[in-house]
Image: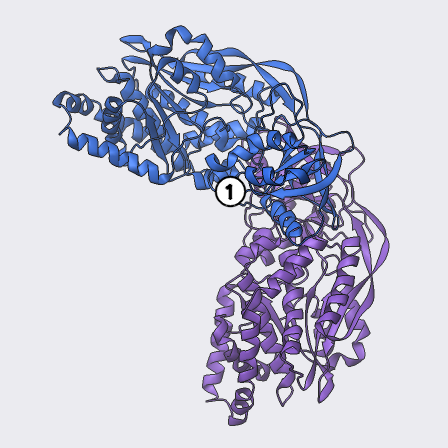
Chain colours: A purple, B blue
Amino acid sequence: MTARWFPLVSGTRVLAAVGLIGGLVAAQGSAPASSTSWLDALRTDAARLIQLATRDDFAWQRLATLTDTFGHRPPASDNMARAVAWAVETMKADGLENVRAEPVMVPNWVRGAESAEILEPGRHAVSVLGLGGTVATPPGGLEAEVVAVTSFSELRARAAEVKGRIVLFDVPYSTYSETVAYRTGGARAAAEVGAVAVLIRSVGPMGLRTPHTGSVQYAPGRTGIPALGLAAEDANRIARLSASGRRVRMRLVTSGHHGPPVASANVVGEIVGRERPEEIVLVGGHLDSWDVGTGASDDAVGCVVTWEALRLMKRLGLRPRRTVRVVLWTNEEHGLAGANAYAERYAATASNHVLALEADSGVFAPATLGFSGSLAARLVMAQIGTLLTPLGLQDIGAGGGGADIGPIVQAGNVPALAYLGDPSRYFVIHHTAADTVERIAPDEVSKAAAAIAVVAYVAAEMPERLPR
Amino acid sequence: MTARWFPLVSGTRVLAAVGLIGGLVAAQGSAPASSTSWLDALRTDAARLIQLATRDDFAWQRLATLTDTFGHRPPASDNMARAVAWAVETMKADGLENVRAEPVMVPNWVRGAESAEILEPGRHAVSVLGLGGTVATPPGGLEAEVVAVTSFSELRARAAEVKGRIVLFDVPYSTYSETVAYRTGGARAAAEVGAVAVLIRSVGPMGLRTPHTGSVQYAPGRTGIPALGLAAEDANRIARLSASGRRVRMRLVTSGHHGPPVASANVVGEIVGRERPEEIVLVGGHLDSWDVGTGASDDAVGCVVTWEALRLMKRLGLRPRRTVRVVLWTNEEHGLAGANAYAERYAATASNHVLALEADSGVFAPATLGFSGSLAARLVMAQIGTLLTPLGLQDIGAGGGGADIGPIVQAGNVPALAYLGDPSRYFVIHHTAADTVERIAPDEVSKAAAAIAVVAYVAAEMPERLPR
């Protein structure tokens, strides 16, 4: 998941939204008989999809194969190119239709050697990760005193102290949506008041001296300053030393570079609709990842569980009325090139997308589906949600959408779903070396695949198109 | 804590031992009246020590100052030398007596650049830490295929496959005492059957892609092979790839070197006994640490809480009958030079040590005191333990001793205590970069200081010497 999209809902607000849907259904009396009967006709298929998805750990094993074999997958990397080729080949072997790699040019930032050290008081290495796309320090590194602040407003208040110094944004993690602004915008704000580099307390709950990476956004047309994520413990230490009146001097080294853009691809597979093939139910995740960990939760698992939706239908011989399309996007993390290319390529048919679902928040239990659409659509989605009861998921709440489906959703005014794993587990490992397959339980993967398969199948099969 | 000593008790066995003491007291009837009256006479002082220790976070703040200012403290490092000087100066400021730094020559292994990478299938960096004292790889690293085994017996059974290869000991963590044998002895066993290097699945519960270091022991008189600790997730990944029939080739780089030995020191402070100054109650921890994290739980906290025992007595104006001595040992981790030097220096007076207490297992709640001594001593210790009731600690069980007090305990047949933090929390961060002060709650430090102060004071003040 990148910084550009995140569900603007907390657990409380999801529950409120669920309550809203329930209240609306109640206010309108029971659903029309026709609605009930179309849904009833799909109950057996929904149950079969759930049964097939949850009977073994096929999806988890595929996730392990993907992440073990290819590791992390920066968009321009060999690992990503090999993962794209494997996905195309494996989708074909699954029997998906119109399987193709749709070319996308992607940026090519490559991390170099990195280190950071407290020089005074006492020498001590600290745990850092350059933010994705950071400019490099001078060869040999950059030395300066550190000014620790806890907010943008403290930075402004202390602007006179900052010139020539390293700014540490020591902002305790609350939620991703609240804290990520410092990772994306901290470098720009610090540069404006004369800082020579910026350290960002990692955006996530405290781990085990675990730095988080993620994108940094510089002011357009200006050279940025080096920007590194710092483990929470090291941020604490610098803040304690500063608070006790000690001068903290550091040396930072980061040495990434931008190579020429590279041709990558979105991987696309379909089950072509039997009656209205031009109408599309779109599901997907992103195949690229940051260059740490193996990008298992961000977002190999989103690729696997959405792809599974089609594989499960194929295995059961289900060909719904409309087309179901899975897209494994490239370069979600570093500029959304794949998402934008998809929206451009399908601009003329954007409004043919009847539903778009993105899985890019992990699958950690307790998971939920979030939906964004009109009132009429929400009422139908609440009915579809009743088919998921055997999975023990929460009711479908608010918060649909995602970074990769964003452009096509906007272009076509498409109702949008998101599969949302528990954020308290997801953000511990998000954009870290610890984003690996062992954190994810097989039944969490199977449940996500089952839920997405049911929702996608029903949206593709139901007699009436899902209301806008 | 090093590999050479660890409490050979599980929680269950501690409880059994507690039951044993209880049973023995019951079998002998109530304790002699004289015992009860001497203990009653000390209750007020014990309560004052507890009250002073637990009224604020002084001990935690001292721990933060030590670890923030000096960071990790390999025995031959500048950080350690500065920490020794600070401890001497600060003990004097506390009013301790006979404060001195007793010189000890220590080995001087310095970690160099390290990395490890899977080359086939796919290139991927893995998370390693060279074991302390490992020989270096050739410049540029070492490349070989990996053979993953789960035990010494599997290594022997597959000895024919190992020649020229890297052995991965993928041994799941159970307890430290069961698993650490692979870290200390794995390199030797693998070298004997022709391996060129060894990777040890880190000895601890799975963290966040967290490698653990610790000492490696080579066969005497033979050149060892490079030995690195590997994060559990990476061990899993290699094992999964191997199990699926994939050839796994890796490149390992480790480049530490041994410099000439360096003069370090044990730091010693005392409260001289008012009646029997020649009788010593010894308490302490080790000031050195591995060169990752800040050695907060291993073992800055052991130094602070044992030192606190003396500072608290001093603050209350308590000068017990016998001498209480705190020793902050040097080089526990890499050869026990400080412990051996202490035992040599005080060989003639070893039997004057009436009790020795080591704090080198963290202070994580729920903590307990472990004791090793004769039946008579255990009965007295069970009585002393009743003074700790206000702290909510478990009863004093079995498992006294420690690596640093080991030599003097053996030389003098000294009854031995250990302060034992919860191992499930301790071994997650043991010998890792995540061993920092933020994991330790202030009240855990205060409780440990209080308990150690009470036990040390009572052992120093009680009319009769604690039975051998």
Q: Which residue is mark 1?
A: B173
- Say few, some or many: other residues with alpha carbon within 10 Å of mark 1 (under 14 / 14 to 19 / 20 or more): some
Which residue occupies 76% across, 29% down?
B138
Q: Amino acid at mark 1?
A: Tyr
Count how many numbered circles sit on residues in the image. 1
Residue at the limit of the structure toward the top, as seen here: B348
* Callout 1: chain: B
Q: Secondary structure at mark 1?
A: loop
x, y percentage for residue B359? 42, 27
Q: Is residue B47 visible?
A: yes
Which residue occupies 28% across, 32% down?
B388
**A365, A310: nearer the viewer:** A310
Which residue occupies 72% across, 58% down?
A288
Note whether B121 is above or below B445 in the view shown.
Answer: below
Residue at the limit of the structure toward the bottom, as seen here: A33
Please state, as top left, top right, bottom left or bottom right, where the C terminus of chain B lies in the image.
Answer: top left
B448 lies left or right of A240: left
A465 lies left or right of B278: right
